[in-house]
Image (cartoon, coloured by chain):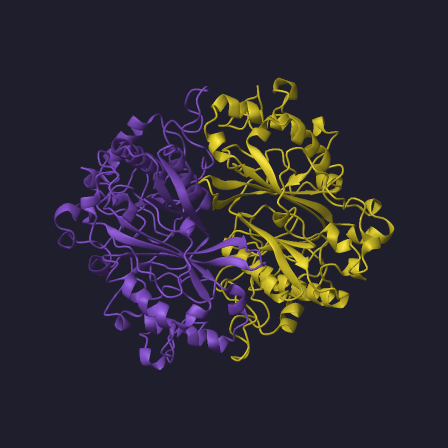
Chain colours: A purple, B yellow
Amino acid sequence: MSEETRAPSRRSVLGWGGAGLALGAAAAGGTVALTRGGDHTAPAADGGAAVPFHGDRQAGIATAVQDRLHFAAFDVKTEDRAELVRLLKDWTRAAALMTAGHEVGEGAFGGLPEAPPDDTGEALGLRPSRLTLTIGFGPSLFDGRFGLAGRRPGALVELPKFPGDNLDPARSGGDLCVQACADDPQVAVHAIRNLARIGFGKVAVRWSQLGFGKTSSTTPDAQTPRNMMGFKDGTRNIAGTDAKALDQHVWVGPEDVRGASAWLAGGSYLVARRIRMNIETWDRTSLQEQEDVFGRDKAEGAPVGKAKEHDEPFLKAMKPDAHVRLAHPDSNGGATILRRGYSFTDGTDGLGRLDAGLFFLAYQRDVRKGFVPVQTALARHDALNEYIQHVGSALFAVPPGVRDKDDWWGRALFS
Amino acid sequence: MSEETRAPSRRSVLGWGGAGLALGAAAAGGTVALTRGGDHTAPAADGGAAVPFHGDRQAGIATAVQDRLHFAAFDVKTEDRAELVRLLKDWTRAAALMTAGHEVGEGAFGGLPEAPPDDTGEALGLRPSRLTLTIGFGPSLFDGRFGLAGRRPGALVELPKFPGDNLDPARSGGDLCVQACADDPQVAVHAIRNLARIGFGKVAVRWSQLGFGKTSSTTPDAQTPRNMMGFKDGTRNIAGTDAKALDQHVWVGPEDVRGASAWLAGGSYLVARRIRMNIETWDRTSLQEQEDVFGRDKAEGAPVGKAKEHDEPFLKAMKPDAHVRLAHPDSNGGATILRRGYSFTDGTDGLGRLDAGLFFLAYQRDVRKGFVPVQTALARHDALNEYIQHVGSALFAVPPGVRDKDDWWGRALFS
């Protein structure tokens, strides 16, 4: 787990080189806390703090889930491998600065007046806000344009078409993704925007998603958030502090990726699904039906027949098509994923219905033993299917962390 | 100005009647602070507090601007005046509960198991978060369906078509609007959703807008927020504590609305405009050009030739087409409006460009002396027009406050 530090509000630093040195020095050891500003380690509850960027793992996975999300999938437009590599290096440098609460490059007004500013400026004066930036590589990146065809990991499959899927290609796939999580949405939006800007002409945003409320927590002691159906979500999620469970279910081990795909060791796989909820139908459903559908009571979140949210579920007490029963590891050969999803609402559709739901994000060690079996069971039988529809889908291989200032996103893959 | 109170996290109350009595008693006098939970008046910085619903003015106008917005415009579907009146009464009751941090009706699980819950539940456990709900009536409500044609105030005009407008009818107009502002987006979204649900079959959401970051402040001592162009916005906004300026420029006086439109005395007019920014073009513009366009420097926000953000602008030092110069009251016969807008980003368009910008909200005493002259000048000459486009527009008459538990949104209009 990352430690966190208090940090002053974000401000310009003089040039990239100096900042890189400062960050590199502070981050020696990977998870040592940043110490700019004479700071102390802060509790996870301090939404203004900085999360260290450098480390063995990328931040934004086991990190205590931040309040807001901006997620973007990119298509690579250049066919020049060297140009893509330069972009990944530039992105890494910018990500290190932004997550530490700095502006990109010389900032919004540190450069020449005749030149566009290096940073778009709208996050100036805001605190680091626990911003994390997490990169992933989609299956299409390995199609041969960049000489990566032989390095595609075995678990970076094409996801099967599940029953009920109604996927919009314009909300699916992508060569690259960046997940920006922060406790302030303006900080997350600023980060994605500046990465897109740095990538202008080389990559283009394929789709993006704003999430306004986390629906899963990786901190079991905290209050479990509620999803847009009004139910507590992620009660039995993997804790970000449970190293054993993370090693077992989330991090790709060296033994999983031998040979040409060894670059992914220490990384993970990310499934992103846009799940639209039929909010109006759900809202006219009886409380009894709602609780039967989930297999938990709505008030406390306790499993059927139990008193407390965190009581062990007795699956056979639930209806056979109850969501919790079908999704439980015991119903899926032990399959366990780390959920990190967010509620979204994107206005209304042409019929005046709220275009809202869950942007599902799940990290796992092997998607073939994680999301795929769970979703196969859910897609076939889940009582919840009457009220939801999967409308977007993507899968990404998430590389390990950037270890120090000389490292960059994807170095092991492109070396 | 409303006082604010600490309040416990939101929870169910037993039935509407009891809650109504409790609220009514506490709110005697209109702006007396709610006292549930044995609490004290809290500073505006306490994002979890409750803003009193009852008072001479609606909250959400002079109230210190909250962090997040969910705005919805509704079409009225019923043609039955009595049914519309019943809805407005139901909405008022629900609004009083939700702004106080309670659930609607008997809550998400207080009713019969065989019935849909009264509340959708996703805000349970969250604090009141300074939620305000502000209603407005659009020009189309006065078209004769409800016998209101004779009661349309003179300033509730059809807005002129301004040069450069590219308005989408699906993002414009509406018979009714509700502005939900809160420091937690889930609380704002919950409120709009539950009002829409209560209105099912009688009203339908015509369009809605989520705002993730405030771009104007009504608290001059606080840090001025930055818009998506990276500039400080709303530096010279009307302060929510400046009773004289509010009376002069924001609140409709009795002398403004004699006779059949006297129901609007104590209210205001709200202009809502969705302003798309050509983010990618802006981001490639030089710092000098950006500063010339605004007439302020980007770092400090100082007017051209001045040192500090709050220094009085010397308009003639600015370029003739500078935004600040053209929008200044001195360039528009004193026209002054209270701005309360939010940044938005709604993903990307079909070309991979960020669909982002400013959802402009402005309150004023008379739109013909406020927004119309200012926007006429801006639409003709503003250098900013190269980088923005108005794509949605609406105007609403905003009635005065709900005085006590027997009062309801629109009572004076429908009585």
- Residue drawn at 32 percent across, 69 percent down: A377
Q: Nearer the viewer, residue A52 or A181?
A: A181
Q: Nearer the viewer, residue A380 or B87?
A: A380
Q: Nearer the viewer, residue B228 or A160?
A: A160
Tell me residue A20's x, y (percent): 28, 31
- Residue drawn at 29 percent across, 27 percent down: A18
- Residue drawn at 46 percent across, 72 percent down: A299
**Residue A328 shows in this picture:** yes
So how many labels did they put on this image?
Answer: 0
Vertical arrangement, residue B169 with respect to residue A377, above or below: above
Name the outermost residue toward the right.
Answer: B259
- Residue drawn at 74 percent across, 50 percent down: B139
**Residue A226 shows in this picture:** no
Horizontal side, residue A40 vs residue A154: left or right: right
Tell me residue A242's x, y (percent): 24, 59
In terms of image quadrants, where is residue A145? top left
Q: Nearer the viewer, residue B398 or A116?
A: A116
Horizontal side, residue B43 vs residue A43: left or right: right
In terms of image quadrants, where is residue B240? top right
Tell me residue B395's x, y (percent): 70, 46
Tell me residue A329's x, y (percent): 27, 69
Quadrant for the C terminus of chain A in the image? top left
